[in-house]
Each structure stands twice: as structure tokens, then as C-alpha cells.
Amino acid sequence: MPLENNFQHDELSRKNPGERLRVADLTDVVPPDSPEWGVTMARYGMCLSQAGVTSVVFLHGSLHGTDLFGMQRLDEAGGLKRGYSRGVSGVDALLAAMREETNGIPLLPGGLRPPLSNDDGTKHLLDEQIGDAGNFTDASVESFRRAINANLTQSISCRRLLWSSEHHHLGRALAAVRLLDTLHRLCTEQVWGKSHRILVQAHGQAGLVLALASNMLCPSPITGRPKLLNILNAYAEQTHQSELADAMRRIESLLTTATLLNGVALDIVTFGMPVRYGWDSSGIGKLLHVVNHRNLRTDGKNWLAKMELPQITMEMPMAWGGDYVQELAVAGSDAVPTTELGKAANKMVWEMVEPYDGFERWLECARRAVRFPSEGRCLLVDYKDSTGSTNPRDHYYGHAVYTRRHAMLFNLTQIVRTFYQI
């Protein structure tokens, strides 16, 4: 995407990423917290410190109770009862595998639904219900913190942020505002500046939150930023969310003057992020996209997912091709806001950031089988999570493995090699 992307959607290019692309396998897993694991993690901690990284932020949502594939919007736009499969073989079975009621992914206890709160109680509930499946647990983050700081005199802070998990444009835009406000306070409180870096690891649609944040951080006076903030501010006032309105007031002038991060570089790694929003690289540091992927294609285009019907419906329950959530939760899919005010504000944001709507446009985007955005480095990884099991809770359709504890060292290895040159 160009500099001053101004909230344009990604172009969904099927071209070979070329030098941007690397391929890796998760092999020879070192047991977490073993002596070898600790020594290697500590060595990478030294690399992070020498590169100026002062904080690692783990941003994630919930796999449970959040309409993971975005079927609400597809049903609202068409609906099987109205025959929106239009004779495309295999679509009915595919959509049944995506729908909350039939995809095998449980709801959260007590009917808890988004927006989820970034508080200890909610995080503890997720840790109990989901463990480390698509979830950066407190135990994992603490283990990471201890390990990378083992040989450092100046510790690198590590924090876990739970975004609201509202899988629609409004929810992601509001989460971007809250995230930028949090990062600003972090930089201000710690008195960090141009020699420092923050590394954010974002799972799933948390990556889309950061894509929107990257556009907000553009140092040029783009037209989309005040427009988006006006929409969000009006929504905050209409819904009496004074804390949210205060956050927008705090960051608006800082975004205009490009001083929100006080010169700190924001390095971003996304894991299993669907390709939707375009990125603006002018206001951020380094950018890497990691996707769980196993090549099933016969045309030599190993950087693309396989999107053939009805075959995909047979492969998906065993996650044969890798991350099917990343592949299918594309433009046209989404959860639906629960209030009329939310729906109205979501429509205004939607008209800014995504020119696709309806079942046919969703199918068009999904069939493009694009694994990576047009901006940033790309890493295809076979995480070896397809074991033949058809129980979604074993793999969550290939979307859970990135945050598993056994993958932590591997992920950090790839980040350090890509960003910080070891």
C-alpha cells in the first residue's frame, strides 16, 4: 500500500510477494521452561534490548463467543434461507462450518459476549476456558517476561492487552483508539523516546486493529483521520462513553503533530490476520505477518491458500491447509453491532475502510486466497497442528496455534531474525 494510505482497503494482490516472503516449519520444539529454552530466550532478550526494545505488548481477543468467521453479516446480507449460495457447489456446507451454532466453537460462560473488558477477571476467564489457544495467557506472558529478562540489567516490560473482540469495523476502530491511548500513556510514563522501540504481537483480528492504528499514525495530514475520529467521537457522545471520548481528545492533537509515541518506533507482528485493511508504513517501524499455512496447491503458487469448493469443506475440519479463519474472515464477513446507534456508526466507518459488501463480494475476496497484505514482511509457517482431529477445539481451524506455549520460542526466533538481525 502507498504511503498516506488514508484508510484504503488492501488491494488483495495475488502476485508473488518475492523477497518479502519467507517459509519456515515448526520443528524440533524445545520444551518450554527447559534449560535450553531458557538460555535461548535469554539470548533473544539481549537481542531485543540491544535493538532498543523496551516493551513487548501481546494483543489478542477471544476465540469463543465472538462470531469468529463473521457469519452474522453474511447471514444479514443474504442468508441460506434466501438461497444466497447461487448454485455454487459446496457453499452451504462451508457456511455451516463457519456459523457459530454449528462450527463447534463454544460460547463463553454466562452468555458473555463482546465487548469484552480488558480486566483481570475477563482474562482469567479466558485462561480457564481457552487456555493458550489463540490466547496470550497470563502464565505465558509472565514466562516470556522472566525468560527474556534473565540476563538484562534494564528489564523489558511485557504486558497483555485484551481488545473488545467486536469483529466489525466500529469495534476495531474504537479498539485502535484505545490501543493508541494506551501506548501514548506507556511512552509518557516511561519517558521513552527516539532510541526506543515497542514490539506488539497481535493475534487474529487484533492485527486489523493495528492496521487501522497505522493509518491513524500517518505523520501527514491525511483527510481520513479527522473524518474517522469525528464518527467515533459522535458515537462515544451518543452512547455516553465519556472515557472513550476523553481518550480521543487526548490522542487527536498528538496524531496531527505525529508526537503520540514521542518518537518511539512501533514494531508489529501479526499472527493469522485476515487480509482486509491497508497498512500505512510511514508512522510505524517494522512489520511482519505470520500465517499458519500448508501448501495444497498444484499451480506452484505456494504463497496462496487453497480456496476450491467443495474440497475446502472436507479439508477445513482437520485444518489441512493451515489457518482457515485467516482465509475466510475477509471483507463482507463480520459480526453485527447490537444497537441501532452501533449499526449506524459501523456503516459510516465501513464506507470509509472497505468497499466490499454482500455474499458475492465476500466469496470473491475469499476465493482470491490471499495470505498477506501488500505491506510488510511475510512468513508462511507450517505449525504442524493438523493431526487428523476433527474436533475444532484441537486446532480452531488452524487459528489457535500461534499463541501455544510450545510455539513461543519459535515465534521469537523468527521475530528476532526478521527484525533485529542475529
Image (cartoon, rainbow, N blue to C red):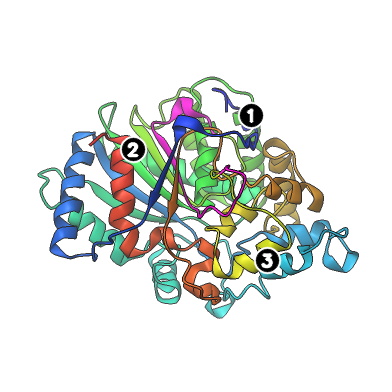
Q: Residues within 10 Å of mark 2 (few under 14, many from 20)?
A: some
x and y, in percent, of residue 18 in the image: 49, 31
Q: Amino acid at mark 1?
A: Gly
Tell me the SS state at disc 3: helix
Dot 1 or dot 2: first in sequence order is: 1
- With respect to residue 78, does 122 lie above or below? below
- Residue at the location (58% across, 63% down)? 114
Distance from disc 3 to disc 2, alpha carbons, whole Å, reads 34 Å
In this view, the residue in front, 266 or 315, is: 315
Question: What residue sits right under mark 3 in the picture?
Answer: 313
Q: Closer to the camera: disc 3 or disc 2?
A: 3
Q: Amino acid at mark 3?
A: Thr
- Residue at the location (28% across, 61% down)? 29
In this view, the residue in front, 30 or 315, is: 315
x and y, in percent, of residue 101 in the image: 68, 75
- Residue at the location (14% across, 43% down)? 154
Dot 3 or dot 1: first in sequence order is: 1
Would you identify the image quadrant in which residue 195 lies? Answer: top left
Q: Amino acid at mark 2?
A: Thr
- Residue at the location (28% across, 55% down)? 409
Residue 26 in sight: yes
Distance from disc 1 to disc 2, alpha carbons, whole Å, reads 31 Å
Question: What residue sits right under mark 2 in the picture?
Answer: 418
Q: In the picture, which quadrant includes the C terminus?
A: top left
Question: What residue sits right under mark 1 in the picture?
Answer: 224
In this view, the residue in front, 377 or 99, is: 377
Q: Closer to the camera: disc 3 or disc 1?
A: 3
Would you identify the image quadrant in which residue 152 lies? Answer: top left
x and y, in percent, of residue 392 in the image: 54, 73
* Magenta segment: 279-301
